[in-house]
Image (cartoon, rainbow, N blue to C red):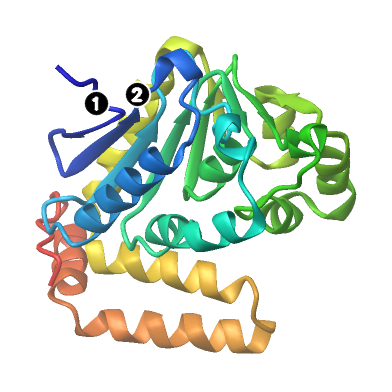
Amino acid sequence: MEEQIIICETLENGVSLITLNRPKVRNALNAELREKMASIFIQLNDDPQTKAIVLTGGDKVFAAGADINDFLTAKTVDIYLRRSEQYWDAINNCRKPIIAAVNGYALGGGCELAMHADIIVAGKSAKFGQPEIKIGLMPGAGGTQRLFRVLGKHKAMKLILTGDMISADAADQMGLVSEVVEDEATIKRTIEIAEQLAGYAPIALEQIKEVANLGVDMPLDAALALERKAFQVLFDTEDQKEGAKAFLEKRDANYKGQ
């Protein structure tokens, strides 16, 4: 029986769990894995039963980077024609909250993959880095741009230029991860957060994610206007009325995504 290189499970309470499953190569992100992962994200994005998504590589490693075997003979035109940006776009364009559970290595493409998530929970064993310089390359899936936006120029440049790894605690101090927990608690904690988000109004979650991601690269006045309009739009949703009513009645809200 062929081993699944990526596993998608539907958990309770509107949470879907995606697990990278190439343990022999530390979940190296080859073309097949990225294509299947993109397909899963597109499917979950359109699935009304999925409210939040957990992404993990399992208990030992998140993803140690791209599959170097892919680089041995590839030419510029080969890399260009792969159009791998479409696979990353499927994750980046997902409207559902994505929470990454990171244990072990999250390097190169693995670090870039983690940064596609909205929330990152790291186990104490986690190691982050962009070591592409060590094989004569540079980050190619957002590593330079996302790190700059999260860490600022000088912290990001040190990671990108040296290729050095940083610990989970260092990543936490820099603002690269949301929280650090014991390794054995990483996936459990991530699912807890996903279940919490899945209990909120889906349209409000989508609007928060969209406005936050778009606004970060906009002038402040324009970003504030975008936020204000999205805030106003939510008053036409049934969920907003249900949320306010449930709060006043001191009960749990029954959100329907309408």
Examine the rendering and report whether any part of residue 167 can be seen. Answer: yes
Q: Which of marks 1 and 2 is nearer the N terminus?
A: 1
| Residue linked to disc 1 | 4
Amino acid beneath label 2 = Asn
Q: Is residue 239 above or below residue 154?
A: below
Cβ atoms under marks 1 and 2 closer than 8 Å: yes
Label 2: which residue? 21
Q: Provide residue 125's location: percent of width, then percent of height.
A: 59, 14
Residue 146: where, in percent of width, then height?
66, 55
- Element at badge 2? loop
The image position of residue 191, as x and y in percent, is: 31, 31
Q: Quadrant of residue 133?
A: top right
Is 134 left, or right, of 31 in this rendering? right
Residue at the image position 15 percent from the left and 66 percent from the top: 257
Query: Is residue 177 in sight in this rendering?
Result: no
Q: Dot 1 lies on which element?
A: loop
Which image quarter holds the C terminus? bottom left
